[in-house]
């Protein structure tokens, strides 16, 4: 990039924490000073929130960067920490999971129930020959067995690799092969959008190409007919008949816990490897600190899929290690009606809701009347993750879900970071809509310019992490070189500049005048218009700040005069008039609105009104595909797309002129 990112957006609203929450917050302002004074001591104290079978000898071994070892010599069992210790403390009858199936069937699992199921699954896996260090692929819908399967692997030291239930046979095959998984845990199907989807046929197709797979364990969820081979075992005939007695054995703090594949924008998926002690320390601490979770009274609901890192860290490991009661929902937010999420909040009296900007913008599109139809008064804290949240979406979330008074925590992190890194603390931070604000205590983040210099307040550039953190990825599975190249070779020692190893996150960011951090989107998506680097996020936020727009995506398309030109795709809000001349007028208004908000340089060359945007299963906009459309190329890889018909809709609109 020729210059640091232009800093265009000027958002000045700020919201202090509610006094009552601040007074009783789990984590207060002194935590920042504590983390700064003695970072390793700080993390050592957080590790102390867990139950260890053997104390560590050294907090951090950073003698061979960028390969970190945390809590060296320590031993613990992750499943013991998530289940047994709560049961042993007399909390076995406490609800761990209120599960809601998409068709409306429900299950309630107490800590004792989940413990029993996990022990049975651990015994069944052992019976199938799985031992510590083996890899197990998990390809399940959002059912409690998914959490039990992950915990059973953790319990016996097997490394799980969860693959999104929506991924194709090819994607599943690649992931099984890369990790040479020995067992696959799946289901006949699951419920999505009002009908049963199939999973088993996809697994059959993949397993035929994966000689490493010895056994397939199949949960019966939908009761559909499935083909059967000698490798297949029904979950209810193996797991549910296995002994519920299982003594969890401790593993080394650096024992591999899971691999999770992240596709990035291009190329082969990367198997991000996480280990045991540091990962659990930071997921557990951040659940306590960022969500202010009070296990006795809160009902936590993270709406993510378990196949996304957010589901790993904030459905399974973070909440369960804290002994929380939570909600788990199988299906989509508009099945059978657009109020389904709010109905669930109301039904289970959810107190903490953690969801994604894509969902909030979808709810904006549907209109505020829908949440208004439910009793959301149980809520006390709202969270967001996955993409930059546009200030207007943040305000909408706080206003129509949070009664205009709840704190919103915008949490920045990645599959690679394992846990939340930059976020407000709900009892401390005066949050600004659209900003992830401040690195958490014990985390050192910065924004650098092209030359690797820390930018002053008011400047923009690249987000980096300057010190190792407990839940950091340890490598890319089977590819240490790619690990170094991807994350550690842009700045610092890995780039031949000094002794400091600097982690490059791949995101653009700016520091505002108070030093607060604003995420500006992936640097691969940054647009270069007449020599200015312009962030996709800022233009999108400007569009979303117009009352007629619910959601927007912008890309840079090749342009003969400006190098790149801004092409925007906007989803109108439910009430906006968009046909014929009204549509033309709206487009003209939007172009002017962006120019007025951000300056003439950011005025889109072209705006398309579209019904939907292409998104990954975790809700991230796939700008790469929109760039293909804007430049009238044939579409690239669409395998991680949530709904491929969306692209036909958008491309046909594009072909129609303008
Ligand atoms: C947890 C997760 C990571 C990428 C990350 C960034 C984007 C996530 C964000 C955010 C702005 C936030 N991202 N949270 N951008 N503000 N609060 O999403 O992991 O799927 O690996 O994606 O998502 O671009 O680099 P993952």
Image (cartoon, rainbow, N blue to C red):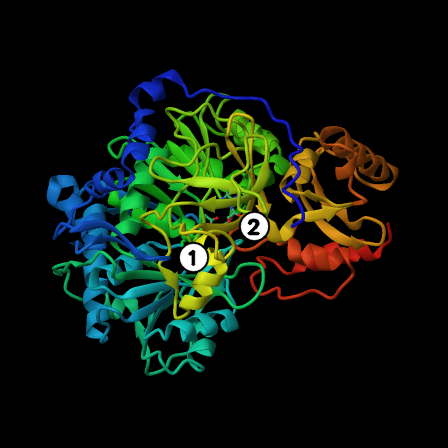
Residue where numbered disc 1 is placed: 307
Residue where numbered disc 2 is placed: 620
Instruction: State the SS at label 2.
Output: loop
Q: Is residue 183 above or below residue 117?
A: below
Q: Classify residue 150 by image quadrant.
A: bottom left
Instruction: State the SS at label 1.
Output: loop
Q: Where residue 292 sits: x, y (%)? A: 33, 31
Which residue shows up at 21% across the image and 64% down it? 156
Q: Where residue 470 sits: x, y (%)? A: 31, 48
**In-front residue for pair 240/381:** 381
Which residue shows up at 77% across the image and 38% down it? 601
Q: Where residue 520 sits: x, y (%)? A: 59, 41
Q: Is residue 630 above or below residue 374?
A: below
- Left of 97 or right of it: where is 429? right
Q: Where residue 135 sits: x, y (%)? A: 31, 70
**In-front residue for pair 469/190:** 469
How many residues crowd mark 2 within 10 Å: few (<14), some (14–19), many (20+)?
Answer: some
Q: How many marks?
A: 2
| Ligand 1 within 8 Å of the CB at mark 2 | yes
- Left of 38 or right of it: where is 362? right
Visible residue check, residue 611:
no
**In-front residue for pair 107/76:** 76
- Left of 186 or right of it: where is 605? right
- Left of 446 or right of it: where is 37? left
């Amino acid at each position: 990039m020729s210059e640091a990112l232009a800093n265009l957006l000027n958002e000045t609203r700020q919201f202090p924490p509610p006094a009552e929450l601040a007074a009783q917050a789990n984590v207060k302002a002194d935590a920042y000073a504590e983390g700064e004074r003695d970072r390793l001591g700080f993390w050592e104290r957080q590790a102390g929130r867990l139950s260890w079978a053997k104390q560590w000898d050294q907090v951090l071994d950073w003698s061979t960067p960028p390969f970190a070892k945390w809590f060296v010599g320590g031993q613990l069992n992750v499943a013991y920490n998530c289940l047994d210790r709560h049961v042993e403390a007399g909390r076995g009858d406490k609800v761990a999971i209120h599960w809601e199936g998409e068709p409306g069937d429900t299950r309630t699992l107490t800590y004792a129930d989940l413990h029993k199921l996990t022990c049975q699954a651990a015994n069944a896996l052992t019976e199938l020959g799985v031992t510590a260090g083996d890899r197990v692929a998990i390809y399940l819908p959002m059912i409690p067995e998914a959490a039990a399967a992950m915990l059973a692997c953790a319990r016996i030291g097997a490394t799980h690799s969860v693959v999104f239930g929506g991924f194709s046979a090819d994607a599943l095959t690649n992931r099984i092969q890369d990790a040479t998984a020995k067992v696959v845990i799946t289901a006949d199907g699951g419920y999505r959008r009002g009908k049963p989807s199939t999973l088993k046929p996809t697994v059959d197709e993949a397993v035929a190409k994966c000689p490493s797979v010895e056994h397939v364990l199949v949960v019966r969820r939908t009761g559909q007919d499935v083909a059967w081979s000698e490798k297949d075992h029904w979950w209810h005939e193996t797991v549910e008949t296995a002994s519920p007695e299982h003594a969890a054995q401790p593993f080394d703090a650096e024992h591999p816990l899971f691999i999770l594949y992240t596709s990035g924008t291009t190329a082969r998926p990367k198997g991000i490897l996480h280990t045991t002690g540091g990962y659990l320390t930071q997921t557990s601490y951040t659940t306590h600190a960022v969500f202010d979770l009070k296990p006795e009274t809160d009902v936590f609901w993270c709406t993510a899929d378990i196949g996304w890192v957010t589901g790993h860290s904030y459905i399974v490991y973070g909440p369960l290690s804290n002994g929380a009661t939570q909600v788990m929902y199988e299906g989509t937010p508009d099945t059978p009606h657009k109020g389904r999420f709010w109905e669930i909040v109301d039904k289970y009296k959810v107190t903490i809701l953690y969801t994604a900007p894509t969902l909030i913008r979808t709810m904006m599109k549907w209109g505020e009347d829908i949440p208004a139809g439910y009793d959301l008064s149980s809520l006390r804290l709202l969270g967001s993750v996955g993409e930059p949240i546009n200030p207007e979406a943040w305000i909408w979330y706080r206003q129509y879900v949070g009664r205009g008074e709840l704190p919103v925590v915008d949490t920045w992190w990645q599959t690679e970071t394992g846990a939340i890194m930059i976020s407000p603390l709900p009892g401390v931070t005066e949050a600004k809509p659209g900003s992830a604000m401040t690195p958490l205590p014990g985390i050192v983040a910065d924004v650098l310019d092209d030359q690797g210099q820390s930018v002053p307040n008011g400047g923009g550039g690249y987000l980096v992490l300057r010190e190792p953190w407990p839940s950091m990825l340890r490598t890319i599975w089977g590819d240490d070189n790619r690990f170094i190249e991807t994350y550690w070779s842009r700045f610092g020692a890995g780039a031949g500049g000094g002794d400091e190893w600097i982690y490059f996150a791949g995101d653009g960011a700016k520091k505002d005048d108070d030093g607060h951090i604003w995420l500006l989107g992936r640097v691969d998506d940054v647009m270069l218009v007449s020599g200015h680097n312009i962030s996709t996020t800022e233009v999108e936020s400007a569009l979303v700040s117009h009352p007629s727009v619910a959601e927007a995506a912008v890309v840079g398309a090749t342009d003969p005069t400006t190098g790149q030109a801004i092409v925007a795709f906007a989803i109108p809000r439910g009430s906006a008039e968009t046909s014929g001349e009204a549509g033309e007028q709206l487009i003209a208004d939007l172009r002017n609105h962006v120019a007025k908000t951000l300056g003439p340089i950011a005025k889109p060359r072209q705006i398309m009104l579209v019904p939907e945007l292409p998104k990954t299963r975790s809700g991230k906009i796939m700008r790469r595909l929109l760039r293909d459309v804007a430049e009238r190329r044939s579409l690239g890889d669409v395998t991680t797309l949530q709904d491929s018909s969306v692209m036909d809709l958008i491309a046909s609109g594009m072909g129609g002129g303008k």
